[in-house]
Amino acid sequence: MQERTKNFIILGLIFGVFIAFFVTGRFLINVDELPKLNQGTLIVPHVDIDDLGLTRDGAPYTNKDTRGQWWLGYIADGTCDTACKNGLFYLMRQLERSLDRDASRVSRLIIHTAPPNAELRAFLDENVAGMVEIDGPADKIDTLLPPAMESSSDSASHHIFLISPDGMIFMWYPTHEDMDAVLLEADKIRDDLKRTLKGSLVG
């Protein structure tokens, strides 16, 4: 047998093994059961902030306003309990600062679906200053977000969201009263943010 023919046979066997392995893996492995890298819960489909009817100081707040930055968002219904305060302070303000050189690529915003009560207003001013504050209709937000969140709750309030520079809300996290749970959640958000920022040229 000629040397050239042998080489073609060997090459064919190599490709055959590779193809067999690929086909077998494709049909015997359920990709939905493979470990997922993200720690938070994906929002499927992503929700465009343009669809939420948001305003800032009376003017429309759109994905043009989110360009150039990644965002940690929180939806407030006018009240703020312990879990809310933990979320705003530890899962947003402190977490943003912990990103070191990437901190400048992330901004914080809060969406008010109702006027903040005195307790929330004081906490925002005294403990987590610097958040972008915008307003949004509760009915529209709660119609669009919870179904995409796959959440048992019918409200999007009191959750933390990741928002991309093009204004897509794509992942969410719960808030907690228990500090151990808060610290675990902070690690999850930080992991997701660092991975996202590492793979992005935007922001």
Image (tube, grey):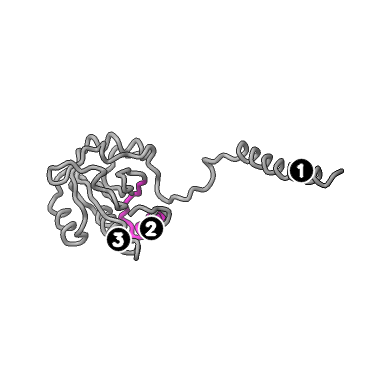
Badge number at residue 104:
3
Q: Rounded to the nearest whole Å, what is the CA distance between mark 1 and mark 3?
A: 56 Å
Mark 1 Cα-neighbour bin, 10 Å: few <14, some 14–19, many ≥20: few
- Residue 173 is one of the magenta-drawn residues: yes
Q: Is residue 128 left or right of residue 9?
A: left
Q: Nearer the viewer, residue 3 or 76?
A: 3
Mark 2 Cα-neighbour bin, 10 Å: few <14, some 14–19, many ≥20: some
Question: What residue sits 17% from the left and 42% below the top?
Answer: 55
Percent across and percent down for residue 159 are 30, 47
Give, as a three-letter code, the residue at label 2. Arg
Q: Secondary structure at mark 1?
A: helix
Q: Quadrant of the C terminus?
A: bottom left
Badge number at residue 190:
2
Q: Quadrant of residue 97?
A: bottom left
Question: What residue sits 36% from the left and 37% below the top?
Answer: 148
Q: Which residues are magenta?
A: 171-192
Mark 3 Cα-neighbour bin, 10 Å: few <14, some 14–19, many ≥20: few
Badge number at residue 8:
1
Closer to viewer: mark 2 or mark 3: 3
Give, as a three-letter code, the residue at label 1. Phe
Question: What residue sits 31% from the left and 60% below the top?
Answer: 96
Q: Is residue 145 left or right of residue 3?
A: left
Q: Secondary structure at mark 3?
A: helix
